[in-house]
Amino acid sequence: MYTVLLASFSDFFDTPGEVPFMYKKAGYKVVVFCCDTCWLRSNSFFDEWIDVNKDKETFANSLIQLIKEKGNQFDKVVLLDDETIKLMNEHITDESLFVKIMPLNKIENRGMLSSKIGMSTVFEKYNITTPRYLNFAEENNFDIIGSKLDFPVLLKVDFSFSGTGIRKCDAPNELEEKINELHDSKNVVIQEFIEGEDIGVEALFSDGELICYQAAKVLSYMNNKFSFTTRRTYFRNEKIEQSLQQLGRSVGLNSFASIGYIYHKERDAYYLIEVDPRTNSWMPYSRFTNHSFIDGLNQIAFGNNNKLTRKIKDENRETEIAIFDRDLRRCMKTKDLKGFMRWIFNYKGYWRFIPLYDRKYFSRIMNKMVVDLFKLKK
């Protein structure tokens, strides 16, 4: 049986909770490597749990030792979140070990892992279309920045997630003010802000080849444009597909990737904003579209991994999807009565998205929602 080792250091990210489900449904044996409080254990779809102490050094060294000694037992190793990827990237020096554990098969591009500065450098190396950017540590003169970039710009902390390290600056004086507020102004990217439509993309790659993907227009954000999303409309697009194929082959993507584009309508152009080679919460919901990652994972393990997974029927169908707990939390936070009504009256089949398929996972999700509700009332 094809065996996957899923690893997650963090215990506060809920994204890993549904990932074992995808692999199990694709026919894999699923082994999870995490501490006892990790969301990776909050499901009924893993075969074996390898317990590891919640300490960075212990986690990294234990995973490296496991792969060195028993790596042949695992057909695939998948790191599930940014913090885990960053941690292992800092500890792995051997190229063969890097290719076995990390989500890239080109070690020379490791600088892009959990680093916005490194990512921008890699994009430039392969002539990938992105908004113009500067590394603030190299161009810390505000007059020079103003001559090279058009405002508004985005100030991006090098390592951040869920939009927490992004600030929009409309003028040079605002940029200077917000940079001075940072504890570390050396590891910062300044990127031109392109007015357009946010496009969220999930993709699966194997040895640089695109296996399957789904793209989405954003319908709702938790807080603002830079926070995580709660509702999306999924679709297919040939330009995005071609861009993903170029990206995968150039960079050497070799696992899941969570990707962001900005679509500029007047130019009819998609600008690549970000690539996080990890899973995200939307991937298990691909089973409600015609392009399930479960099929893609099955194809990698048991079929030809060089052909893009397709289903001819309803190829261009759009599908609206909402993440149950995220969207209800957003409704509570913003007092969105209309949003509540969607869930109450099963708008467009929203009840499908309630994770009742797994009692263990559903229980932890509900507990989290109750905790969040009490926080909002305080």
Image: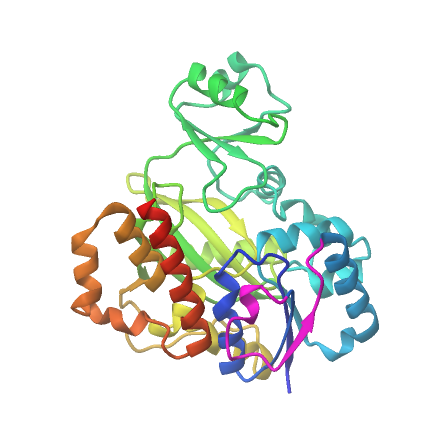
Please report the bounds of the magenta region as a residue range.
36-55
The C terminus is located in which quarter? Answer: top left
Q: Residue at x 33, y 35 (%)?
A: 195
Q: Position of residue 218 (x, y in %)?
A: 31, 51
The main secondary structure of the magenta stretch is loop
Q: Nearer the viewer, residue 149 or 173?
A: 173
Q: Position of residue 151 (x, y in %)?
A: 40, 23
The answer to whether residue 169 is left or right of residue 299 is left
Q: Residue at x 72, y 53 (%)?
A: 56
The answer to whether residue 66 is left or right of residue 226 is right
Question: Is residue 378 highlighted in magenta?
Answer: no
Looking at the image, the residue that sits furthest to the top is 143
The N terminus is located in which quarter? Answer: bottom right
Q: Position of residue 37 (x, y in %)?
A: 58, 64
- Whether residue 236 is visible here, answered yes or no, is no
- Whether residue 208 is visible here, answered yes or no, is yes
Q: Nearer the viewer, residue 373 or 326?
A: 373
